[in-house]
Amino acid sequence: MSCEILGISFDAPEANKAFREKHDFPFRLLSDYDEQVGVKYETRDPGTDKVSYSKRYSYLIEPEGIIRKSYEVSEIPVHPGEVLADLYELQNA
């Protein structure tokens, strides 16, 4: 099983590029500047004005677009291990 990691933020593409360069961020970072993806994935409340940041969520999504697992990320250092364990479980199911 292969896995592609993408990040997404409400920042403009230029800000994302600067973040990637400053922090040597190894993954593609997408811009949801109009916050429509955030509304669809419920990381942003659609009834509020534009916000500067979203809730921290991550998803395991199959190539067909099926969400297999969602996470509300609270402990950032622990999160990668959780995802890797779930990827392993899905691969061996």
Image (tube, rainbow, N blue to C red):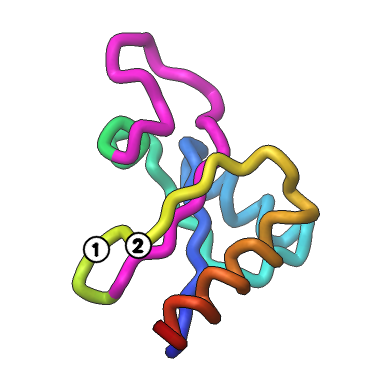
Q: Residue at x 29, y 19 (%)?
A: 46
Q: Find residue 66 and name its label.
A: 1
Q: Residue at x 61, y 72 (%)?
A: 85
Image quadrant assignment for residue 47: top left
SS at mark 1 in the image: loop
Residue 12 at x, y = what percent?
Answer: 48, 41
Q: Which is more toward the observer, 50 or 62? A: 62
Q: Main secondary structure of the magenta part?
A: loop
Residue closest to the far left:
64
Neighbor class of circle 2 (other Cα within 10 Å; few <14, some 14-19, many 20+) is few
Residue 20 at x, y = what percent?
Answer: 67, 59
Q: Is residue 36 left or right of residue 6?
A: left
Residue closest to the far top:
48
Residue 5 at x, y = what percent?
Answer: 51, 69
Which part of the image, by quadrant, shows the C terminus?
bottom left
Neighbor class of circle 1 (other Cα within 10 Å; few <14, some 14-19, many 20+) is few
Q: Is residue 62 above or below residue 56?
A: below
Residue span colored magenta: 41-62
Q: Which is more toward the observer, 40 or 93? A: 93
Q: Is residue 59 above or below residue 45?
A: below
- Mark 1 and mark 2 residues within 8 Å of each other at the beta carbon: yes
Res 34 seen here = no
Q: Find residue 25 and name its label.
A: none
SS at mark 2 in the image: strand
Label 2, on which residue? 68
Q: Which is more toward the observer, 86 or 75? A: 86
